[in-house]
Amino acid sequence: MNSLPWLSLVATVALYAGAKRLYTKRPRIYFSPLLTVPALLASLLLTTHISYDTYHSGTQWLNLMLQPATIAFAVPLYKYRHLLKKHAVEIIPSVFFGSVIAMVSSAWIAEGLNIDKQLVGSLIPRSVTTPIAMDISRLTGGVPAVTAVVVILTGILGSLLGPLVIRYLKIDSEIARGVLLGTSSHAVGTVRAFQFSPTTGTVACVSMILAALITISTVQLLLPVMI
Amino acid sequence: MNRIGKSAVQIAILCGLAFLSNFLVAQFSLPLPGSVVGIALLFGLLQLGVLRLEWIESGANLLLAELLLFFIPSAVGVVQYRSLLFSHGIAILIVVVAGSVVIMAGSGLLATQLAWTRRKS
């Protein structure tokens, strides 16, 4: 039984490596590693009756690496700082607008669908990066762990929908594309933005950080219109 | 030092920064998560010239290239919420899809509009 956590880790890394190679060869949205690997692993856990706790005990250090990896975003931010400064007047208001829409639309659509208050509260912060979203979830009466799952779902769907919206609305500036991806779907959207171009990715990265800061500082002001 | 060793040392520096950021957040009860403090800290150190870009860049690029791997364990966490997904899955999907499209259109179009107004003036 003791080998199960190790096996979970090896399986996760191996499946990820395989999925990434497949995605590089055939870049179809349904081959996205963040879609295929968790789906495979989740069905594996369910069919073999291995608990998530067992799986998590082996893979928690991957989770821990999320923080240094997020901090690594400071490198592109630093390299493109002049570009960001030059476009601050476009980026800041757009991210602000997008972040307010994010909170209010999640709350209103969820309420329109008669979802209970706790789940509405868990959905409101879904567009920002996980640690901040979980903090905000407490303020909006949600369940932080549920928020974490919805945040990932938002990232996955956002990186699939983003390019479609960009094409449909003919958004051709790198700045606007970056704002769109970073504001709507945090780090996962930012990874997608780097596939467009380094500039798009960097703008997405700064948008993701701004969105997190704007959301955490305005959520309480917006609570009366949301809940 | 070979390339793998170099990247490993650089990743270790980034881990050290993460540790330091969490310590600062706890020590001064900052209302921000460690990752945001860490980005500000690393940016500041690069700006001040304490850290040089080439001391950190290949490790940072490696972590960023594999960022999705680090999200997988949390995504697998969905198995804990099977009943929620069965009862509310469709509704959650509608909120996420419809909401995301509105956010994308709003922020993307505003940024395009602002850039256009600015070029004109």
Image (cartoon, coloured by chain):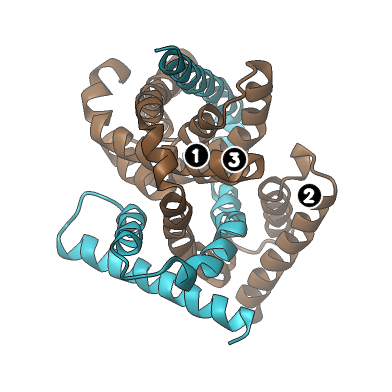
> Can you give x and y, in whole percent of width and height, for residue A5 in the image?
61, 74
Which chain is home to disc 1?
A
Looking at this view, is B57 or A116 the one in front? Answer: B57
Residue placed under numbered mark 3 in the picture: A193
The quadrant where residue A29 appears: top right
In the rendered structure, the answer to whether residue A126 lies left or right of residue A28 reads left
- Give the crowd class for mark 2: few <14, some 14-19, many >=20 residues within 10 Å: some
The amino acid marked with disc number 1 is Ala
> Can you give x and y, in whole percent of width and height, for residue A97 in the image?
37, 21
Q: Quadrant of the C terminus of chain B?
A: top left
Which chain is home to disc 3?
A
Among all residues in the image, which is located at the extreme bottom? B1
Looking at this view, is B48 or A118 the one in front? Answer: B48
The amino acid marked with disc number 2 is Tyr
Q: Secondary structure at mark 2?
A: helix
Q: Which chain is brown?
A: A
| Residue A23: mark | 2
Q: Earlier in the sequence, mark 1 or mark 3?
A: 3
